[in-house]
Image (cartoon, rainbow, N blue to C red):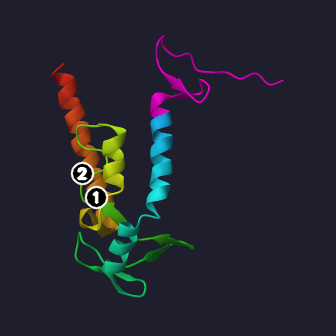
Amino acid sequence: MARRWYIARPAGEKTRCGGRWTEARWKSFVKNQLRGATRKWAPIQDCLRNARVKRGLYLCAGCGEHVASTIKQGAKRVKNVIIDHIEPIVPVTGWVSWDSCIERMFCEEDQLQLLCKECHDSKSKEEAAERAAYRRKAKENK
């Protein structure tokens, strides 16, 4: 019988999945499953449909350009349009609650926008930098 090795955790830390997952890993797992469910959320499909200019061509809300739905990268075709939440799912202040997370994930169409991959990557990078700056400032104030 194979032995299972577990990472030693500090006393009192909550664990999930039979002691194999930390609380953070569990939260990540649940959020990932919820993200999968958003693919069936009608306002996301409506946002995609409303941004469509013609077959395979969409209007990016970030740069205002018409962009192809996919682009060729080497021998593969990759997705080039992303439905983005105008207000980030995780606020600058960090985790709030499951209710808040679900409300933000399953928002209405007026809180969604279609972005090209380039615009989405730059917006995500800015949001991550804001969260990092907030955490640094909060750490300094302790």
Q: Amino acid at mark 2?
A: Glu
Residue where numbered disc 2 is placed: 126
Residue occupying image coordinates x 42% and y 84%: 56
Coordinates of residue 103 in the picture (x, y in percent): 32, 50
Residue occupying image coordinates x 20% and y 35%: 134
**Would you say 36 lies left or right of 108 here?**
right
Mark 1 near mark 2, Cβ–Cβ under 8 Å?
Answer: yes
- Height in image: 58 above or below 32? below
Q: Amino acid at mark 1?
A: Ser
Q: Residue furthest bottom?
A: 54
- Height in image: 24 above or below 68? above
Res 42 → quadrant:
bottom left
Magenta stretch containing residue 48, yes or no?
A: no
Coordinates of residue 52 in the picture (x, y in percent): 34, 82
**Would you say 43 lies left or right of 6 here?**
left
Q: Which quarter of the rendering shows the C terminus? A: top left
Check disc 2 and report its element: helix, strand or loop: helix
Res 67 → quadrant:
bottom left
Check disc 1 and report its element: helix, strand or loop: helix
Is residue 81 visible in this depiction of the protein?
A: no
Coordinates of residue 84 in the picture (x, y in percent): 32, 62
* Number of marks present in the image shown: 2
Per the picture, the main secondary structure of the magenta-coloured stretch is loop
Is residue 38 visible in this depiction of the protein?
A: yes
Find residue 122 and name its label.
1
State which region is magenta. 1-25
- Height in image: 99 above or below 57? above
- Height in image: 34 above or below 18? below
Q: Residue furthest left?
A: 141
